[in-house]
Amino acid sequence: MRLRANQNKLKIEHSILDGLRPVLERLVEDPDIRSIIPGVIRPVRDAKGAVRIRVTVPVQNGWKAIALAAGARQELFISTPLGQEELEKRIAAALG
């Protein structure tokens, strides 16, 4: 499978939750975000309302986050040198 990319930073291997793509596109404009790789979408009960993103655990080159929207959750792998608090601030700004 070929990767499709937006600004060579947003890697699209799977579909993206409704309303999440504009948030991710705003987030990749940040020079400290090296890349964002959305993962698999799974249905959940507690994902109602507007898009929410929660940073969960550190990974080798950044952070894993969970996006919740439209009755589903999607893993996001964010490659960045930022710490958790600073990344959460930038995600909040991108959510608007």
Image: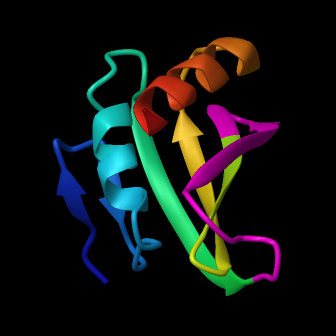
Q: Residue at x 40, y 39 (%)?
A: 35
Q: Residue at x 34, y 58 (%)?
A: 21
Residue situated in front as seen by the camera: 5 or 18: 18
x, y percentage for residue 3? Answer: 27, 68
Q: Residue at x 68, y 36 (%)?
A: 63
Q: Say if 40 sits above or below 78 in the image.
A: below
- Describe residue 93's horizontal placement relative to residue 75 as left or right: left
- Describe residue 66's horizontal placement relative to residue 79 as left or right: right
Q: Say if 71 sits above or below 63 in the image.
A: below
- Describe residue 87's horizontal placement relative to residue 22 as left or right: right
Residue lying furthest left: 7
Quadrant location, the C terminus = top left
Coloration mode: rainbow
x, y percentage for residue 10? Answer: 32, 50
Question: Residue 34 sits in which quadrant?
Answer: top left
Q: Residue at x 59, y 49 (%)?
A: 77
The stretch of residues the image draws in magenta is: 44-63
As for residue 31 lying within the magenta part, the answer is no
Quadrant location, the N terminus = bottom left
x, y percentage for residue 14? Answer: 42, 78
As for residue 58 lying within the magenta part, the answer is yes
